[in-house]
Image (spheres, rainbow, N blue to C red):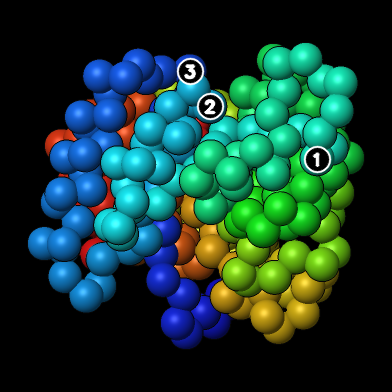
């Protein structure tokens, strides 16, 4: 087992995916208002709303411990790319991070590791933290390929100049997303240990400070067990981040 990184503050990030209208800002405000009561061991807390709500959510979060992330960005800073938004625009809207390489983008938009790396580099260029998602499909797990897949995705998706300050890795097994299924705790720990070792191989000892989140059906009733595992430095939460009470229960489990 890898040594647990000494002073890594964990992060619980909510990925709202394609959910959220203006009324959903009430849930974000409820999360914001509960954060001061969580105590000194509270994790960092982030909400990644759809792009339409970035600016409004940044206003809700202003002056609080709540931070804001986007769900995607284009590699280029600007240009003729109808419908896309750049990392610079994400930053300008008040976000401090952006998710790249989510499996839903890889599946829905055919994004390959190379484009994920370009998007992560764009995030860094704009001064954002890149939350790079990796994870195996059900078929890859059944074939015993999980560790090979995450090593390959890491190697190809992470800019070589990444640091503990501007990189977060999210391990999200594709088959666990939105299904209510999660890997066995020992399997999560094995993958996170592999990710940590790979990161150290690519980025050096500073990679001990990179936060590695687990994502995929994290709920209030399984969060404590998952978040206590070695090298699990927080969670990327989908469905359960849409309700303030559920999201706060997960945040409390990380504290
Ligand atoms: P669920 O928590 O809904 O399984 O989604 C996980 C996820 O994809 C977060 O990015």
Q: Quadrant of the C terminus?
A: bottom left
Element under disc 3: loop
The label nearer to you, 2 versus 3, is 2
Q: Which mark is residue 51?
A: 2
Q: Residue at x 67, y 58 (%)?
A: 127
- C-alpha separation, residue under disc 1 versus residue under disc 3: 23 Å
**How far across and down, in percent of the image, does residue 181 sit?**
41, 29
Q: Is residue 51 left or right of residue 47?
A: right
Residue hosting label 3: 18
Q: Which of the four quarters of the rendered structure image does ligand 1 lie in?
A: top left
Check disc 3: other Cα within 10 Å, few if <14, some if 14-19, many if 20+: few
Q: Is residue 137 above or below residue 34?
A: above
Q: Point out residue 168 in the picture as x, y percentages from the top left corner.
A: 59, 57
Compared with 22, 184 (above or below) is below
Which residue is at the front of the view, 220 or 124? 124
What residue is rendered at 53% in x and 39% in y?
A: 93
Picture quarter with the N terminus: bottom right
Q: Quadrant of residue 252?
A: bottom left
């Amino acid at each position: 087992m890898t040594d647990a990184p000494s002073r890594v503050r964990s992060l619980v990030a909510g990925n709202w995916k394609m959910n959220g209208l203006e009324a959903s800002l009430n849930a974000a405000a409820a999360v914001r208002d509960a954060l001061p009561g969580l105590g000194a061991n509270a994790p960092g807390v982030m909400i990644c709303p759809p792009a339409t709500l970035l600016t409004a959510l940044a206003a809700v979060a202003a002056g609080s411990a709540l931070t804001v992330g986007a769900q995607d960005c284009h590699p280029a800073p600007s240009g003729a790319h109808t419908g896309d938004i750049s990392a610079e625009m994400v930053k300008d809207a008040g976000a401090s991070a952006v998710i790249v390489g989510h499996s839903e983008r890889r599946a829905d938009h055919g994004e390959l590791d190379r484009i994920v790396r370009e998007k992560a580099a764009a995030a860094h260029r704009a001064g954002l933290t890149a939350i790079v998602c990796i994870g195996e499909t059900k078929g890859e797990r059944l074939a015993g390929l999980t560790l090979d897949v995450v090593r390959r995705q890491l190697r190809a998706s992470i800019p070589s100049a990444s640091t503990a300050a501007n990189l977060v890795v999210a391990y999200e097994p594709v088959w666990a997303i939105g299904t209510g299924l999660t890997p066995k705790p020992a399997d999560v720990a094995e993958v996170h240990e592999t990710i940590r070792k790979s990161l150290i191989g690519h980025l050096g000892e500073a990679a001990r400070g990179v936060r590695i989140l687990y994502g995929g059906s994290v709920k209030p009733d399984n969060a404590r067990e998952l978040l206590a595992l070695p090298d699990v430095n927080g969670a990327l939460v989908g469905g359960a981040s849409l309700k303030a009470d559920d999201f706060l229960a997960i945040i409390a489990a990380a504290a």
